[in-house]
Image: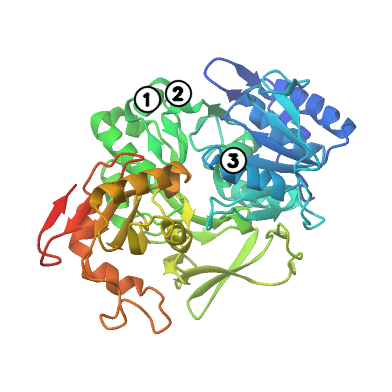
Amino acid sequence: MLNTVPVSHAQLLQFADRIALDDGEQQLSYHELALQVSILSAWLVASPYQRIAISGDNSIAWVIADLALAQANKIAIPVPVFFSAQQQQFMLAEAGVELVLQTQPSEQSQPTVINGLWAKRLNPVEHQATSMPISSGKITFTSGTTSTPKGVCLSWKQQAATCDGLQQALAEQFSGAPQLHYCLLPLATLLENVAGVYLPLRLGQRVLMLSAAKTGLAGSSGLDLPTFIASLLQYRPASLILTPQLLQALLLICRQHPELSRTFRFIAVGGAHCAKALLTQAAALKLPIFQGYGLSEAGSVVALNLPQQQRQNSVGKPLPHVAVRVRQQHIEVNGQLFSGYLGEMPRDPEAWLDTGDLGYLDEDGYLVIQGRSKHLLISSYGRNISPEWLEAELQSCPAIAQAMVLGDAKPWLSVVLTLRANASKQTLQQQLSQLNTQLPDYARLRTVLVINTPFTQANQQLTANGRLRRQPIIEQYQTAIEQLYQQQPDPLIPTIMAVAAKEELTYEFF
């Protein structure tokens, strides 16, 4: 029989007195978790609200709220903590959220029936409901391929199917005595939500969820390394889900504390392209790294390397809940997929979805990713960013004449730009700093290359209709761009590097 919710009451009860959730101060057994979920679910069923957001830092109450919303068949809208205030307001309004469950009290919030969880009613006049597919169970918002995030509508049945596929693939790996999974990424991140909470609970594991202050991970890309090290040394988890940038940090930590390498049994890496050099370094440290691939429209994970089934430079074989094919290098998926986008018509469940990624399936069925068909940037922290959005935002800076944003597979974004006549570097820095305060942290421009020669059709850096030709620009300034990523920029005040008289020869920092 197919599961209709990601984690059912019966699935929780089968592990009885095992520890299910641990926040470093409080522990909840599987039996206690099942009871708490049932209590909150009954409270939600009795409420008149259908579209309900979950807001706040990682916590036991966040997980209870998520599981209870599924059990009550309500629509859950996780609010990413790394979204800007403007983006959060947009998504609440766009989804027509009627009630927000918060892990911290706020003005006008009231306690719920669960400790550590408060509820805040939103004004229905301010939040008009946008149409969505009738089967919607969770609306997960992308990290903002534009300034306005896009809502992906997933049914609870679809999320259960993703869990079924993951459980089938990893049940053997996590059989035996329960192990500890460390939820490092924010729970509003679909990958951690599904593979870091639902899956471990199905497998009877203990799930550790610390606040950001205790993990060292702030926003979408900030990392306090000493705090992260302290948490790993204290809890010594068996499994983690990492972005490539966090893997880079883990490699540094394991060189300093080689004994940590022996505690891990499974480290999944996804969210962005992972450089071959990082995987090679991980292998040298004997870290059990398994690269995967996924997208929100497929409920997160589509393909994953496994201990008994892996191939270097691939993202593994597709999981059972989806089918993958490649047509003219475009990767397409089918099977248990999303219901549609918020505000749009429901999608045909039989239709294949073009992921926008390019690659191929090798002779043994392993999926290899070769790039993207669009200009979408994916930072090494796994944040999806449209350069066109930020290039439009940069037009608000009077000092800038032209600009091209870059940062694919990098820890932060940079911009190559030309200045308007009489604009000074100091004025530019002031304007960019002001712009950065208005952007979510993953979209801030931290390093800048000022060039002397404008982008034109003549130098092959503009198309005939005036669009940027990105690759020729990157190739022209490759050396300078590499120097940008050797800096240690401030989160808000960008580091500016200007091309001197002879471009691509000498540079001056400001």
Residue holding disc 1: 227
Q: What residue type is disc 2 on?
A: Lys
User: Disc number at residue 188?
Assistant: 3
In the rendered structure, the answer to whether residue 373 lies left or right of residue 48 reads: left
Q: Can you give x and y, in whole percent of width and height, for residue 122 in the image?
A: 76, 35
143 over 108 or under it: above or below:
below
Q: Can you give x and y, in whole percent of width and height, for residue 42 in the image?
A: 85, 29
Q: CA distance from mark 1 to mark 3?
A: 22 Å
In the rendered structure, the answer to whether residue 222 lies left or right of residue 104 reads: left
22 over 290 or under it: above or below:
above
Q: Nearer the viewer, residue 30 or 187?
A: 187
- Crowding at label 3, few (<14), some or many (≥20) Cα neighbours within 10 Å? many
Name the secondary structure under disc 3.
loop
Name the secondary structure under disc 1.
helix
Counting residues from the start of the chain, the first of labels 1 and 3 encountered is 3
Residue ranking furthest to the top: 25
Residue holding disc 2: 214
Can residue 139 be seen?
yes
Q: What residue type is disc 1 on?
A: Thr
Residue 457 picture quarter: bottom left
Whether pointer 2 and pointer 1 mark residues with C-beta atoms closer than 8 Å, the reply is yes
Q: Can you give x and y, in whole percent of width and height, for residue 340 in the image?
A: 71, 61
Residue at the (58%, 44%) spot, across then down: 86
